[in-house]
Amino acid sequence: MARALINVPAKSKRGEIIEIKTLMSHPMETGFRPGMDGQLIPRDIIEKFVCTYNGEVVFSAQLYPAITANPFISFTTIATDSGTLVFSWTDNKGDMQVQTASIQVE
Amino acid sequence: MNTTRRQFSLLAASASFALVTPARATPDSMKASIQAFTGGKPIKEGRVKFDISLLVENGNSVPLSVLVDSPMTKDNHVTRIGIFNEKNPLPDVAIFNLTPRCGRAQIATRMRLNDTQFITAIAEMSDGTYFTAKSEVIVTMPACVEE
């Protein structure tokens, strides 16, 4: 798998609701499209997205082929403590890509 | 008998239609998928603000966002948001699992649209009730056609 873009505010106030945006580089091949040889291109999609905040799951998602290539997911969380946000994307073959972002809460 | 040009083009059109048409979700399969999501519980209108373009040129990437009216406390929050469609090959689009730590029941993503159709968003509350909003999107160039 490949690169991910993650947008987390670098600094935030305690208790503030912050918006997190993620963009993962992935073809999200649906498995419904024929290739050049007329055969269907095998399915290759991210099925699961999970975000943990200092070890606790705050948000997760199940994705289907109707989600675009390079899936974009945006959600919110409460800035509770300084620490680490861990993002993971798992595809239908079980490969997992993990990225982290640090957050500073004042 | 010689095949006339009109007959030939009609034949060719129907043959290619039969070949090209893939498996498709139908309003019925969407209903089944929603039934699986809610467990057959009643779904009410309201509380869900579903934001998606009404007219899109390119069905390959259509931004959408959902905002559910909820205090997001431990006792009263949105647990899941499901997005469903009628006419893509599969009725499911995505299911988002939320927690009270989200602070706000708000998500955004981008989806593919194979055709002009209704898209439905359903929110599951922590007390087991369901709320929905739907929106029709007109697509001028569907996804899944180009190589």
Image (cartoon, coloured by chain):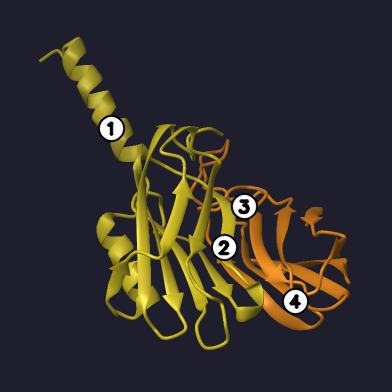
Q: Which chain is orange?
A: A
Q: Position of residue B136 (x, y in %)?
A: 34, 45
Q: Distance between the residues labelled 1 and 4?
A: 51 Å
Residue type highlighted by circle 4: Thr
Residue type highlighted by circle 3: Met
Q: In this view, does B39 lie to the left or right of A18?
A: left
Q: Mark 2 lies on which chain?
A: B
Q: Which chain carries label 1?
A: B
Q: How far apart are marks 1 and 2 (CA)?
A: 46 Å
Task: Tell us which disc is closer to us: 2 or 4.
Answer: 2
- Residue identified by numbered label 2: B106
Q: Mark 1 or 2 closer to N-term?
A: 1
Q: Is residue B23 above or below residue B73?
A: above
- Residue identified by numbered label 1: B15
- Residue identified by numbered label 4: A52
Q: How crowded is mark 3: few (under 14 residues within 10 Å), some or many (20 or more)?
A: many
Whether marks 3 and 2 lie on the same chain: no
Q: Residue at x 68, y 77 (%)?
A: A58
Whether marks 2 and 4 lie on the same chain: no
Q: In this view, does B134 lie above or below B72?
A: above
Q: Residue at x 54, y 52 (%)?
A: A30
Q: Where is residue A90 in the image (x, y as percent from the top left)?
A: 69, 68
Question: Which of the numbered marks, if any, corresponds to residue A28?
Answer: 3
Residue type highlighted by circle 1: Ala
**Could you say which is closer to the camera, residue A79 or residue A46?**
A79
Q: How far apart are marks 3 and 2 (CA)?
A: 23 Å
Residue A2 shows in this picture: no
Quadrant of the frame with the C terminus of chain A: bottom right
Marks 3 and 4 close (CB-CB < 8 Å): no
